[in-house]
Amino acid sequence: MTSIPKRLKMKKRQVAIFAFFTALRALAALPGVVDANHLQRTREARYVMGTILEITLYYHDVRQARQILEEAFSLAQRLDSLLSNYKSESEINRLNRKAGTGPVKISAELYGFLELAKSLARNTDGAFDITVGPLMELWQKASKQRRFPSEPSTKAAQSLVGSTGLILYLEHKAELRKRGMSIDTGGIGKGYAVDRIADLLKSHGITRALVNFGHSSIRAMGTPPHALAWRLLLQFPGDEPLGILEVKDQALSASSSLGKSFEIEGKTYGHLIDPKLGTAVSKKIQAVVLSQTASVAEALSKYVILRNPPEERDQDLWSPVKILRLSKDEKNRRSEGFPLLNLSRDKQN
């Protein structure tokens, strides 16, 4: 997924660390634990989309569970070939190369992804926008040259950004209206994959699972046997642990504005680009968003960092959402009912 290219020498930090804990120590100590309903735990982790995808599930048949895991990892690989900005022949890059040339026939899978991304751009007032590609490219060059983009180049890139310029037609056709437009999937790609994997697991009758993609996009299905929730340790790199998150039938996304950073003129900037301002974020802001799906949580985590949402939102998209926003320069925010235990740095309103 696109952010600052790996070839650049920058300070790289994992966005957030979520360590999985079973609710009962006895369960954690015994591999392949069987509960009263004969559910057995199966867990596997593989390298996908430039990071680690780990899936833990409980199912009555271990052999069948491993077959389901194979199917899930195959799905993740297929989505990578569809959405990766790093693979020149991915379907998203083929669409980018056709920008400004008219409607292009695309797969139903990519069409569904683009529909979702456009709706999230509307609901975040453009704070999340997958057409941010030209600005990402501009700041990639700036980070390599250690020099700020010029004002004319920034304005030129901004003129190519905006989801209204991404048009979807019937019969699975899409168009990027202006030559030079490009879609960057890095802000939602892992979350979308997490949701698709969760749907796949549900289709096989699995109701207890944890899909953990890159330690920053997670979907909790049901609970482990004999537990009320999945328990996750929340810790941002370089900081003390914030506490234990308890989640059930929820998705979460963790983002840090300086998760991947670079310096220009002695000041640190992060990989998160504000689509409206055309600038890279320089303040250290960390956000955790809980929602019904990982796709929504990922998109809203960018909004929470860039816009710091008001106390109450009228949009339906925000009604089930819980947020945690940490900043050195502003007052911290924690939604009422945010399920974090032992929060030591809480500065509530």
Image (cartoon, helix red, strand yellow):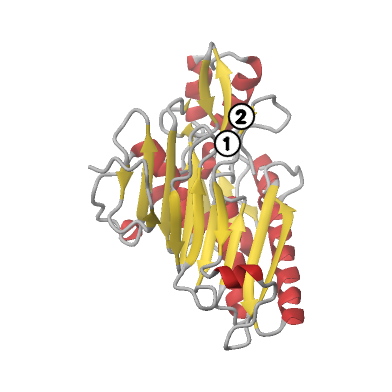
Q: In terms of depth relative to the viewer, which is nearer, 60 or 122?
A: 60
State the quadrant of the N terminus: top right
How many marks the image carries: the answer is: 2
Residue 188 at x, y = what percent?
54, 50
Does the CB distance between marks 2 and 1 fall below 8 Å?
yes
Under tag 1, what secondary structure? Answer: helix
Q: Amino acid at mark 1?
A: Gly
Query: What residue is drawn where x is 46% and y is 28%?
Result: 281
Image height of 288 relative to 220, above or below? above
Identify the residue under disc 2.
Answer: 137
Q: In terms of depth relative to the viewer, which is nearer, 284 or 156?
A: 284
Query: What residue is drawn where x is 56% and y is 75%?
Result: 208
Name the residue furthest top. Answer: 265
State the quadrant of the C terminus: top left
Along the horizontal axis of the image, is 83 left or right of 217? right
Q: Amino acid at mark 2?
A: Glu
Query: What residue is drawn where x is 45% and y is 34%?
Result: 275
